[in-house]
Image (spheres, rainbow, N blue to C red):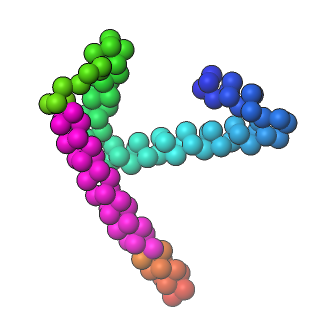
Amino acid sequence: FYVSSLYNGVIATSNTEIILNSVVILFICDVDELLYDILIGLNSGWVERMSLQGQVESVAEYNGRDEGKSTDESNHSLVMRNNLEGAVQSLEREVHILHKTMDMLMEQNAEFKRLL
């Protein structure tokens, strides 16, 4: 949050821009939290594994162990990337289906209201 405030103060040239930039930053934070909640709802185990993996990678980078990855680690990274790409595509399909379902329900709701 501090970095966002500092960045906002540096790039903004007027009070209006400060407010606009603050609203954008808050919006992005809200979207991030909503996406996280959606992912938790869809596949909480995957989110937990990815969160733990991110923590392990952060510690490895901090300790300087990430330099000179072995071939096995590179292959593992490639497999993980492919798995993530597949998961993203699957989520995109599910979101598309949910969107279609929501549109259908909205149409049915409008029809029910019209009948009442």
Q: Is 48 a magenta residue? A: no
Please, is residue 98 above or below residue 18 in the view?
below
Please, is residue 21 above or below residue 6 in the view?
below
Where does residue 109 sit, x and y in percent of width and height?
A: 48, 77
Question: Which residues, given as a range, are shown in magenta?
Answer: 74-103
The front one of 114 and 93 is: 93
Query: What residue is at 78 percent from the left and 34 percent from the top?
Result: 12
Furthest-top residue in this view: 63
Is residue 43 in sight in this rendering? no
Side of 12 relative to 70 (left or right): right
The front one of 25 and 85 is: 85
* Predominant SS of the magenta segment: helix
Please, is residue 18 above or below residue 85 in the view?
above
Query: What residue is at 60 percent from the left and 44 percent from the top?
Result: 27
Furthest-right residue in this view: 14
Q: Is 102 a magenta residue? A: yes
Furthest-bottom residue in this view: 115
Where does residue 37 sit, x and y in percent of width and height?
A: 40, 44
Where does residue 83 sit, x and y in percent of width and height?
A: 23, 47
